[in-house]
Amino acid sequence: MLSKNQLGFFYMFISVCAFSLMDVIVKWSDDYPIGQVLFFRGFCGIIPILFLIPKDRYLDFYKTDRSFLHIKRCLAGLIALIAIFIALRNLPLATVVSISFAAPIFTTIFSIFLLNEKVGFYRWLAVLVGFIGIIVISEPGFSSLNFYYIYPIIFCLGLSYVAIAIRKLSSTEPVWLIGFFFSFSIMILSFFTFYQNWIMPSLKDLFLLSMVGILGGLANLWLTQSYKFSEVSLVTPLKYLALVFAILFGYFIWNEVPTTKTLAGASLVIISSFIIFKREMTLKKRVSVTRHE
């Protein structure tokens, strides 16, 4: 019988694995319009959520008193999701994952304006270190005018607001409702992209595209379970396994070898997020910036 911390460790591990596999499939799916991939992410992402809705809420599960905040959370999430999809298709996998670790940096900044939090010396130092890491990673892209490097940063900005919004919503809203509204909004947005000449997928491709939604939905739920069962300080470092998976998948599938600058910048970004995380744990705040895609 596993302890609560062991269960939390397990859920975080499989969540990271699911997100990593989803990233691989999104990168592989560049023959399909992004809108079509979004449809599968939204439609199939609802499937795991349906099993969590209490039986006595089947008829009115969608009711909420915080509609406007849900809308803002969904808009920010959609911007982040589209940005990361574009980035995954146009940049090395390890580069995208490395920059995505910078989300806590932007959350720290947003928390000043949206949550009226006071940010001290150590977290400002972490923000500076993180920004240096981003510059180190993306410098080759900016110098050669590769504007695709801006998309992982947009992802971080969107994800940071999502983290703030979910922190507010979770005080009154169940996790399954937050997840349902987001997946539903992705599906609705995808309907406006039919003009992009959607492609009829083969059975194999249909399975893989469906897994984008199922993996994304399950990854978010497993992530939530991880923080429910375990101490945040124990399981959060596991999310950096995503960089290891990205390097391995990128090398063996697309022959991508991360540059020294990418690895050095990723190290700075990870150090930065660790400083923020440890400081917030010291301040007794249960904070986690998760992907929520």
Image: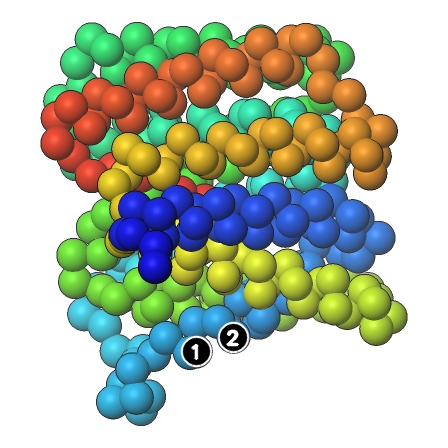
Mark 2 secondary-structure assignment: helix
Q: Is residue 256 toward the left or the right of residue 68 in the image? A: right
Which residue is at a point 41% across and 15% down the rendered structure image?
A: 271
Q: Position of residue 90 (x, y in %)?
A: 74, 34
Query: Does the image show residue 195?
Result: no
Please give left or right for residue 283 compared with residue 43 in the image.
left
- Cα distance in 3D space between marks 2 and 1: 5 Å
Q: Is residue 42 above or below residue 54?
A: above
Residue in the image at 33% along x and 69% along y: 177
Q: Amino acid at mark 1?
A: Leu
Secondary structure beneath label 1: helix
Residues packed near mark 1 inside 10 Å, few (<14), some (14 to 19) or many (20 plus) = few
Residue 213's spot in the image, x, y percent?
59, 63
- Residue 49 found in image quarter: bottom left
Pinpoint residue 216: horizontal percent, then vertical percent: 54, 57
Please indicate whether residue 272 sits to the left or right of residue 219 in the image. Answer: left
Counting labels gives 2
For the question of whether residue 24 can be seen, the reply is yes
Most foreground residue, 137 or 235: 235
The answer to the question of whether label 2 and label 1 lie on touching residues, with beta carbons closer than 8 A, is yes
Along the line of sight, the residue nearer the viewer: 7 or 22: 7
Q: Which residue is located at x 33 percent, y 43 percent?
A: 163
- The residue at which mark 1 appears reads as 50
Question: 165 above or below 118?
Answer: below
Q: Residue furthest front?
A: 1
Q: Is residue 256 above or below residue 18?
A: above
- Tell me if mark 2 has few (under 14), some (14-19) or many (20+) residues whose alpha carbon lies within 10 angstroms of its own: some
The disc placed on residue 47 is: 2
Q: Which residue is pictured at 70% across the width and 45% down the height?
A: 24
The amino acid type, in three-letter code, at marker 2 is Ile
